[in-house]
Amino acid sequence: MHTFLDDPIEVLASFERKQVRPLRMKWQEKIYNIKQVNLIHTGREGTKRLFYFSVSDDANAFKLKLDPDILEWRLVELYSDG
Protein backbone atom coordinates (compact mmCIF):
# COMPACT_ATOMS: atom_id res chain seq x y z
CA MET A 1 0.00 0.00 0.00
CA HIS A 2 1.36 3.42 -0.96
CA THR A 3 -0.02 6.44 0.87
CA PHE A 4 0.76 10.13 0.38
CA LEU A 5 0.74 12.10 3.63
CA ASP A 6 1.80 15.44 5.06
CA ASP A 7 1.91 14.57 8.75
CA PRO A 8 4.16 16.21 11.32
CA ILE A 9 6.52 13.76 13.03
CA GLU A 10 9.16 13.81 15.72
CA VAL A 11 12.58 12.55 14.61
CA LEU A 12 15.67 11.59 16.56
CA ALA A 13 18.61 12.18 14.20
CA SER A 14 22.38 12.23 14.31
CA PHE A 15 24.31 15.14 12.87
CA GLU A 16 27.90 14.17 12.22
CA ARG A 17 30.49 14.83 9.52
CA LYS A 18 28.14 17.37 7.89
CA GLN A 19 25.47 14.69 7.38
CA VAL A 20 22.01 14.18 8.86
CA ARG A 21 20.87 10.63 9.57
CA PRO A 22 17.38 9.91 10.95
CA LEU A 23 17.50 7.18 13.62
CA ARG A 24 13.99 6.99 15.04
CA MET A 25 10.65 8.66 14.39
CA LYS A 26 7.39 9.06 16.26
CA TRP A 27 4.21 9.15 14.20
CA GLN A 28 0.66 8.82 15.54
CA GLU A 29 2.01 7.98 19.04
CA LYS A 30 4.05 5.04 17.70
CA ILE A 31 7.85 4.81 17.62
CA TYR A 32 9.56 3.49 14.47
CA ASN A 33 13.24 2.54 14.60
CA ILE A 34 14.86 3.38 11.29
CA LYS A 35 17.02 0.47 10.18
CA GLN A 36 18.10 1.73 6.76
CA VAL A 37 18.55 5.09 5.06
CA ASN A 38 18.02 4.21 1.42
CA LEU A 39 18.26 7.61 -0.28
CA ILE A 40 18.86 11.25 0.62
CA HIS A 41 18.10 14.05 -1.83
CA THR A 42 17.15 17.71 -1.88
CA GLY A 43 14.26 19.54 -3.45
CA ARG A 44 12.77 23.01 -3.56
CA GLU A 45 9.47 24.62 -2.73
CA GLY A 46 9.84 28.09 -4.16
CA THR A 47 13.13 29.42 -2.81
CA LYS A 48 13.12 27.02 0.15
CA ARG A 49 15.56 24.09 0.06
CA LEU A 50 14.23 20.87 1.59
CA PHE A 51 15.85 17.53 2.39
CA TYR A 52 14.15 14.20 1.70
CA PHE A 53 15.05 10.88 3.31
CA SER A 54 13.79 7.54 2.04
CA VAL A 55 14.10 5.22 5.04
CA SER A 56 12.81 1.86 6.21
CA ASP A 57 12.25 -0.23 9.30
CA ASP A 58 11.63 -3.98 9.35
CA ALA A 59 8.12 -3.70 7.85
CA ASN A 60 7.62 -0.29 6.21
CA ALA A 61 9.28 2.28 3.97
CA PHE A 62 8.87 5.99 4.63
CA LYS A 63 9.73 9.23 2.89
CA LEU A 64 10.57 11.98 5.36
CA LYS A 65 10.93 15.69 4.64
CA LEU A 66 13.12 18.04 6.66
CA ASP A 67 12.70 21.80 6.43
CA PRO A 68 16.01 23.06 7.85
CA ASP A 69 14.82 26.68 8.08
CA ILE A 70 12.22 25.87 10.74
CA LEU A 71 13.62 22.46 11.82
CA GLU A 72 10.37 20.69 10.97
CA TRP A 73 10.07 17.03 9.97
CA ARG A 74 7.08 15.64 8.06
CA LEU A 75 6.12 12.17 6.89
CA VAL A 76 5.20 12.57 3.22
CA GLU A 77 4.92 8.97 1.97
CA LEU A 78 4.35 5.54 3.48
CA TYR A 79 4.82 2.18 1.79
CA SER A 80 3.53 -0.84 3.72
CA ASP A 81 2.19 -4.34 3.14
CA GLY A 82 -1.11 -3.62 4.76
Image: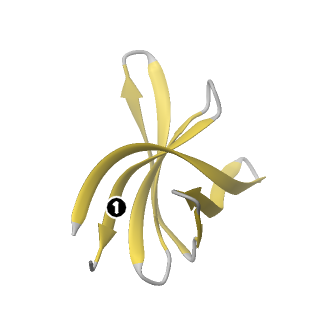
- Which residue reaches farthest right? 16
* Nearest the eye: 70 or 81: 81
Q: Which element carries disc 1, helix, strand or loop?
A: strand
At 64% from the left edge and 53% from the top edge, which residue is drawn? Answer: 11
Quadrant that contains the N terminus: bottom left
**Colour theme:** secondary structure
At 48% from the left edge and 34% from the top edge, which residue is drawn? Answer: 50
Spot occupied by residue 5 in the image (x, y as percentages of width and height): 33, 47
Spot occupied by residue 65 in the image (x, y as percentages of width and height): 47, 44
- Which residue reaches farthest top? 47
Spot occupied by residue 81 in the image (x, y as percentages of width and height): 27, 80
Give the vertical position of 70 relative to 18 (above or below): above
Judged left or right of residue 74, residue 10 is right
Badge 1, how many Cα within 10 Å: few under 14, some, many 20+?
some
Spot occupied by residue 76 in the image (x, y as percentages of width and height): 37, 47
Within the image, what quadrant is residue 72 found in?
Answer: top right
* Nearest the eye: 56 or 30: 30
Judged left or right of residue 76, residue 29 is right
Give the vertical position of 75 relative to 58 (above or below): above
Which residue was labeled with disc 1?
Answer: 78
**In the image, what residue type sits under mark 1?**
Leu
